[in-house]
Amino acid sequence: MKKFLVLALFLASGAANAVQFNMVVLDSLGGDSGAYGMNDSGQIVGNAYNSATGVTEAVVWNSGVVMSLGVEGIARAVNNSGTVVGENGNNATKNNTGDGRAYKWDSTNGYQDLGDLDGSYAGAWGINESGVITGNSYTNYSDFGLLQMHAFRWDAGTMSDLAPPNSTAGYSRGIAINDSGTVVGRASLDTFTNSDKFMAQWDASDTFTHFTGPYSYSSGRDINNAGVSVGLSKDINGDDRASIWSASGSITVFDTFGGNRSAFSAINEAGIAVGYAKNAGDIKLAAISFDGTTLVDLNTLVDLSGTGFVTLNEANDINEFGEIVGFGTRSDGSVGAFALTAVPVPGAVWLFVSGLGMIGWFRRRPSA
């Protein structure tokens, strides 16, 4: 029922200023931290600098309380079964390729290395509700390194190569996967050095499709079960712009908050997308689009007083209840992880209640 309540809130409020968010500051391990993924139970994953060990470790937050997985690196995604995926390595970050190993982790089986395509590097980025995982691995590290990175699909212990059109000298990345098994990311159409890179998809049968942006580069970062994808594309100046692709491939490109970059990181089933956009001072500001056309600064929808935060910089994931996670800047200049929960503002309560009534009517209505 909670999912229906949140959906009613967003639908009934209409205007973005009729929605506000409560903020939860997520525990740290004594240093910087960032939240990158979450499931519908509110379990959150990311990484945090551990002042006791002196390294940045993959972590899970349960009810805001942090737990290290004992893995140096990052946790990027978690499904509703609580299976976490990420990358074990000292250079692993949210968006960049590291030097480590792809893994999955759960509370019953602990840590499991997922293998690789060539005997060297691999990193995991996304997992769906069936436990199918996507990510990236070198295919010929000794000759090409990054120039021959390929996306992979990991399913029931087997890692398969999601090759780009030029399978021997091309480049591809797998970043997210939906419940039907469609992987989204990016790929070159020829060799790495002789081709632009565009938003790419592989369906459950590994059939490749690409969607170009308006100019020379685009990348998908998430895909929902309706086949709507989000990510970024370059503008005429080569700057990133947050972008949404419909299931048929048509693209909507967003502006910034006065700066030169924006990007989306996630989209939920209601079509609400989150990410960031820079302002004129070159500061990243966490951003949200409720309607698929307008970008809103999340900092304007959250009261940061008493939180110790001065800015929310990036929103990295949103679940089916409208809960959002990301990271921001604290008053001492450090970086901290946060979670947001949507609430109706008083002026929208009557609309909210009306929305609940409509949902109740739809659920009670008999079929013909």
Image (cartoon, helix red, strand yellow):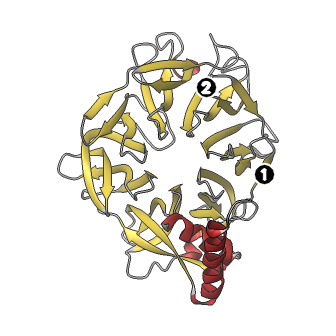
Which of 58/65 is in front? 65
**Measured Cα–Cα span from mark 1 to mark 2:** 23 Å
Horizontal side of residue 301 vs 76, given as left or right: right
Quadrant housing the C terminus: bottom right
In the depicted structure, whether residue 241 falls above or below residue 294: above
Q: How many marks?
A: 2
Whether residue 89 is visible, yes or no, is: no
Which of 17/329 is in front? 17
Residue at figure coordinates x 80%, y 39% from the top left: 215
Give the image quarter of residue 15.
bottom right
Horizontal side of residue 129 vs 294, given as left or right: left
For label 1, the SS is strand
Which of 47/178 is in front? 178
Type of the residue with mark 2: Ser
Type of the residue with mark 1: Thr
In the depicted structure, whether residue 249 falls above or below residue 361: above
Q: Residues within 10 Å of mark 1 (few under 14, many from 20)?
A: some
- Residue 166 got which mark? none
Read off the residue under disc 2.
172
Residue at figure coordinates x 58%, y 29% from the top left: 173
Residue 176 position within the rendered picture, expressed as x and y whole percent measured from the top left = 55, 39
Q: Residue furthest left?
A: 52
Give the image quarter of residue 292.
bottom right
Read off the residue under disc 1.
252
Residue at figure coordinates x 58%, y 20% from the top left: 147
Q: Residues within 10 Å of mark 2 (few under 14, many from 20)?
A: many
Residue 331 position within the rendered picture, expressed as x and y whole percent measured from the top left = 39, 72
